[in-house]
Image (cartoon, helix red, strand yellow):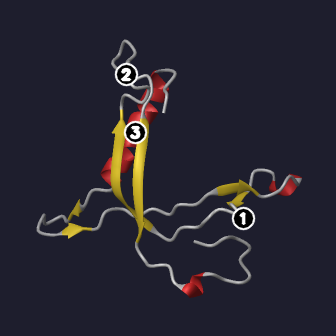
Amino acid sequence: LAPRDKNEAMTIIKIIRFFKQGMSPIRSKSRLFLRSPHTFRLAYKHKASKSSTERNKKTDHPFLNKFKQCFLTDFSVNYTAEGTHTTYNDATPVSMTMDMTFKEIEPIYDVDYKDSDNSVGF
């Protein structure tokens, strides 16, 4: 991530916070119980076709693997992605990298591979 202006820097802050908050457990209103963290649906997307009716429609990538519903197990941000600590005047890092580790909630079974599905599967 490399923000070019203040608006992009604010967007990056929101993205980082979204994932950090999304992987955290949720307290119940009574504060006696914990609810599960948020789950995520990941997919590689690909343009469907060049026809005018489907110009902006995106579908799952036909060759890359698929994912079942996931939860985020690890999230880290390297604020010195270029190897040195460099910031703009407002202290925003010049570039950052995010590393995320997701784990699927349900195991992948042999029946998940459908003959009619023209992909490599999971």
Q: Which residue is mark 2?
A: 84
Q: Give the mark, 2 or 3, whose residue is nearer the N terminus.
A: 3
Work out how far the residue at label 2 is from the one at label 1, CA to CA, in angstroms: 39 Å
Q: In this orientation, which residue lies closer to the viewer: 38 or 115?
A: 115
Give residue 62's position: percent from left, percent from top. 72, 64
User: Is residue 8 shown left or right of residue 46?
Assistant: left
Give the quadrant of residue 88. Answer: top left
- Circle 3: is it few (<14), some (14-19), or many (20+) Cα within 10 Å? few
Residue 106, labelled with which disc?
none
Q: Residue at x 29, y 67 (%)?
A: 36
Of labels 3 and 1, the one closer to you: 1
Label 3 sits on a secondary structure element that is: helix
**Circles 3, 1 touching at the beta carbon (< 8 Å):** no
* SS label for mark 2: loop
**Mark 1, secondary structure of its residue:** loop
In the image, residue 68 lies at what x, y percent?
50, 71
Q: Is residue 57 above or below residue 67?
A: above
Q: Nearer the viewer, residue 121 or 36?
A: 121
Q: Percent from the top left, x then y, of residue 17? A: 34, 43
At label 3, which amino acid type do we have?
Lys
Q: Residue 62, which numbered label?
A: 1
- Residue 40 position, x and y percent, is 45, 62
- Left/right placement of residue 92 relative to residue 108 reads left
Left/right placement of residue 117 relative to residue 10 reads right
Q: Determine which quarter of the picture holds residue 16.
A: top left
Label 2 amino acid?
Thr
Q: Earlier in the sequence, mark 3 or mark 1?
A: 3
Question: How far is mark 2 from mark 3, CA to CA?
Answer: 23 Å
